[in-house]
Image (cartoon, rainbow, N blue to C red):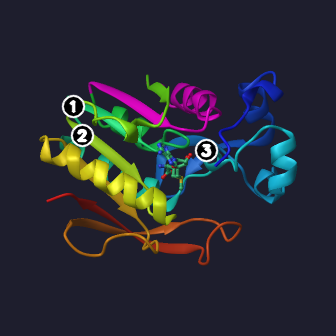
Amino acid sequence: MRGGDVRLIDDPADFIRTHTVLQPVPHAPEIRLYVADEITPIWKMTEEALGELGLDPPFWAFAWAGGQAIARYLLDHTEEAAGKTVLDFASGSGLCAIAAMMAGAKQALACDIDPFCRAAIALNAQANGVRVESVIDDLLDRPPPAVDLILAGDICYDKPVAERVLAWLATAHAAGVRVLIGDPGRTYFPRQGLAHLADYQVRTTRELEDFEIKKTGVWALP
Ligand SMILES: C[S@@+](CC[C@H](N)C(=O)[O-])C[C@H]1O[C@@H](n2cnc3c(N)ncnc32)[C@H](O)[C@@H]1O
């Protein structure tokens, strides 16, 4: 990824409000996010057009199936997050961090490498009446932070990303951190060695996915 040059857009929050619609997350409708849809088709912009605006592909403008599954799981199993310090790794919109706060987390930090996520996370957290801190950085280059719980929604879509993230999550787990992964059967998701917690039939969009409904699981590092 390029690392979005947010300088080319004066006001990221204004850009987000203009190009997205605040709407309920299909599998966690308690949460509303600013997402792209057929009426505001920033997903259809070519990489070249996005590049001229200084934007990475806007991962933050979609509630990915893996993140939706984690959000549903936390809202239905609030004991996983209640009172905990939480890191939403590769947060995109901040969906998992928001779900953790709604489940009673003490504190949630959302982390991504796309600078545009900072504004998206702030807007989405505000829309749901929760407080979420954000950090725009590649945390994989350093030891995992000392939090109680790490959430990783839909991080196995790309081989190099998946390999780095899974190794880093294993290090966190070895240090005593609870790790939850949400995944809709992406190519680089490890199908063994994880504790299966739940399956959901998650509605996504054919703009991005091969099927409108994707069976999506939540797993814990055992
Ligand atoms: C498919 S999206 C998932 C977003 C969100 N977790 C969800 O489920 O809706 C993947 C996200 O991973 C982020 N990402 C990729 N590599 C990363 C890294 N090294 N550190 C943090 N975020 C990263 C991307 O910028 C993107 O926002």
Identify the secondary structure beneath mark 2.
strand
* Residue 47, picture quadrant: bottom right
Q: Position of residue 157 (x, y in %)?
A: 51, 64
The answer to whether the residues at label 2 and label 1 have Cβ atoms under 8 Å apart is yes
The type of residue carrying mark 1 is Lys
**Which of pointers 2 and 1 lies earlier in the amino acid sequence?**
1
Drawn side of residue 127 relative to residue 111, left or right:
right
Drawn side of residue 192 relative to residue 113, left or right:
left
Identify the secondary structure beneath mark 3.
helix
Residue 117, compared with residue 169, is above or below; it is above
The type of residue carrying mark 2 is Leu
**CA–CA distance in space, label 2 to label 1:** 7 Å
**CA–CA distance in space, label 3 to label 1:** 24 Å
Magenta stretch in the rendered image: 106-130
**Which of pointers 3 and 2 lies earlier in the amino acid sequence?**
3
**Mark 3 near ligand 1 (CB under 8 Å)?**
yes
Q: Which residue is mark 3?
A: 60
**Which of pointers 3 and 1 lies earlier in the amino acid sequence?**
3
Q: Which residue is mark 1?
A: 84
Residue 125 lies in the magenta stretch: yes
Q: Is the residue marked by circle 3 packed among few (<14), some (14-19), or many (20+) residues within 10 Å?
A: many
The answer to whether the residues at label 3 and label 1 have Cβ atoms under 8 Å apart is no
Q: Which mark is residue 149?
A: 2
